[in-house]
Amino acid sequence: MLKTLLANVGQYKKDSILTPIYVAGEVVMDVVMPLIMAAMIDQGIEKGNSSAILKYGGLLFLCGLFALVCGTMGARTAATASAGFARNLRRNIFDRIQNFSFANIDRFSTAGLITRMTTDVTNVQNAYQMIIRMLVRSPLILIFSLTMVSIINAQMVLIYLAVVPFLAIGLAIVIHFAHPLFIKVFHTYDHLNNVVQENLQGIRVVKSFVREKQQEKVFGEVSEKVYKNFTLAQRIVAFNMPLLQFSVYTCMLLLSWLGAQFIVDKGTLTTGELVSMFNYTMQILMSLMMISMAFVQILIARTSADRIVEVLDEKSSITNKPEPLKEIADGSIQFKDVCFSYADDMNKLALIDVDLQINAGEVVGIIGGTGSSKSTLVQLIPRLYDVTQGAVLVGGHDVRDYDMVTLRDQVSMVLQNNVLFSGTIKDNLKWGNENATDEEIIAAAKIAQADPFIQEFPDKYDTMIAQGGTNVSGGQKQRLTIARALLKKPKILILDDSTSAVDTKTDREIQAGLKEAIPGTTTIIIAQRITSIQDADRIIVMDDGRIDGIGTHEELLATNKIYQEVSDSQEKGFGEHVDE
């Protein structure tokens, strides 16, 4: 885990190394100053020697100034190093997610990934800053101060040696009980973020069904769970402070009692040395407190670090071969004895024994009931998932032999719930081809029947799209995503129920435009309406992960029971609608 995390320090190694150096300089001054103060008391104040007071006072000022400079520089480099470390972590997590296959993404919830890139990275950032600063300063202070105390009076060291094990045992108990609670807290944070994300994305549905109170209740329950677990963890962690205070007061009392004896009875200790020992006592105990606080922060960060490393160590289940093919001959598609399982389990198959040949330039419709694996079938073509058994061939080669960028550039998919991004309409369409000219953009929009409504906007193609495309209708969004896909000029175009939100007339115009504009492109149309696919060269009927029938509209009406039932139900529904 540490190796994976430290690899993200990158260009901030210099600041990470300079910080302990500055801290060490500050510590040396902090340790020297009590000795100078002791000398000023013994040789200046008690003897009434003003020149000694000025001499040692000047030295104290210079030491304090040097400590201030070192402390300021250490704080600066620590902040730079930790913030840079966090930036690299976020960037590398994001980059790793971009390379995930759908199967990898399915392992992590969206909310969980967001938590890892925000809260978890922040926790690790704070811990890293504390490690390179506090966990350098505190042990050095502890060691140097104990050394100085042993030089002044070796017997006094026994006081601290008795206290340190007490604090160490207390800290170990705190860590043992608090760590499992922090794990629960961060898992609950994932759930909390998921609730918020679902609510914000579906806020229109929430309001239309008047479910605000129910959503508030769900959020309140999860939030209360976070509160209870975090409060309990913090209560356990809070035991650090009374342990430390007890240790401080014990040391002060013992130091005062033994110090007085050494001064009065034995004369082996001066007043100045006793004062310096009080200073060293505070330094020793404060360093222990800082170490304790650092361990608490590391305890919190450890859970976050595990979650971050889990993402960074995740290997994509779909990768390129050593020398992948970088050219696709044509848009022909073949499924050879294909079985597929999302769980990679042959006992839980979503697709079963699929054999299918689609010729280049052919228009193929796919229809079937909900859960018949229509979308699953087409997602294997651009290799969003890999087959569990069998092979999918594009252009005569197994899709696993192609470079993924090459393959996906030539297979353009339009989903029913495709996403638009913040920016202008033109910016969104250029996702299909960033070098597309205005003429090409308009031509694609006209084929997708998007140009008419775009022209109605005051800014036309420069109209801003809100996040998620919330300021355009469902049908408008679908037409824009079809235009975006067309700009790729793919060899294979897949429309996954992507005209469900447009009327039948517009749907027919889109299909006609596609047939005329991209005659050489293999087009696969998944639809619920028979009218969307009845003019296709062939239609595939899916049922429970299997191909139930293949043929033209007329052939399936004559031979396929499922197709007949769908056609009858839709014609009946259309007739009832007309009668009304």
Image (cartoon, grey):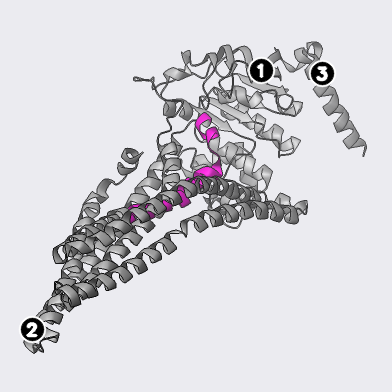
Quarter of the image containing the C terminus?
Answer: top right
- Pointer 1 with pointer 2, Cβ within 8 A: no
Q: Secondary structure at mark 3?
A: helix
Q: Residue furthest right?
A: 579
Q: What's the distance in space between the residues labelled 2 and 3, CA to CA?
A: 109 Å
- Front one among 213 and 332: 213
Q: What's the distance in space between the residues labelled 1 and 3, CA to CA?
A: 18 Å
Q: What's the distance in space between the residues labelled 1 and 2, CA to CA?
A: 104 Å
Left/right of residue 246 with respect to residue 256 in the rendered view? right
Q: Secondary structure at mark 1?
A: loop
Residue at the image position 29 percent from the left and 47 percent from the top: 9
Q: Residues within 10 Å of mark 2 (few under 14, many from 20)?
A: some
Front tag of 1 and 2: 2
Q: Identify the mark nearer the N-term, 1 or 3.
A: 1
Q: Identify the mark nearer the N-term, 1 or 2.
A: 2
Q: Residues within 10 Å of mark 1 (few under 14, many from 20)?
A: some
Q: How many marks?
A: 3
Magenta residues, as a range? 103-130
The residue wearing badge 2 is 52
